[in-house]
Amino acid sequence: MITGKKCMSIKKKSKKAPNIGDRIEHTCNLNGKFMGVVTELLGMQFVYKTDEGNERHCLFRETWRYIDD
């Protein structure tokens, strides 16, 4: 039995994960804003393809939003 240690609570997701084919805008603090279509869902992140053809990844907890076309 471990005593004197606190358990880290897991933060609840603030929004639902996107689906494959959803169009999103990802705001990266280092590189700016990117728009693309979700191509793959992973455990804690998703992969999307930008309009320029690059593949990028985004953690579910990062800043992103759905784009309505």
Image (cartoon, grey):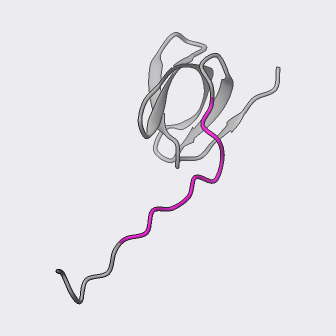
Report the side of 46 relative to 19 (left or right).
left
User: On screen, 5 above or below 55?
Assistant: below
Please tell me which residue is depicted at 59% across the width and 19% down the height of the picture. 20
Count of numbered tags: 0
Q: Nearer the viewer, residue 14 or 68?
A: 14
Please tell me which residue is depicted at 56% across the width and 58% down the height of the picture. 12
* Outermost residue toward the front in this view: 1
Please tell me which residue is depicted at 56% across the width and 18% down the height of the picture. 50
Q: Position of residue 52 (x, y in %)?
A: 55, 12
Q: Which residues are magenta?
A: 8-18
* Outermost residue toward the bottom in this view: 4
Q: Is residue 13 magenta?
A: yes
User: On screen, 21 above or below 26?
Assistant: above
* Outermost residue toward the left in this view: 1
Q: Position of residue 62 (x, y in %)?
A: 53, 47
Report the side of 55 relative to 64 (left or right).
left
Majority secondary structure of magenta residues: loop
Please tell me which residue is depicted at 82% across the width and 20% down the height of the picture. 69
Q: Position of residue 8 (x, y in %)?
A: 37, 71
Dividing the picture into quadrants, the one containing residue 57 is: top left
Q: Quadrant of the N terminus?
A: bottom left
Report the side of 31 relative to 15 (left or right).
left
Dividing the picture into quadrants, the one containing residue 68 is: top right
Q: Position of residue 58 (x, y in %)?
A: 48, 36
User: On screen, 23 above or below 29?
Assistant: above
* Outermost residue toward the top in this view: 53
Dividing the picture into quadrants, the one containing residue 33 is: top right
User: On screen, 18 above or below 63?
Assistant: above
Q: Is residue 44 magenta?
A: no
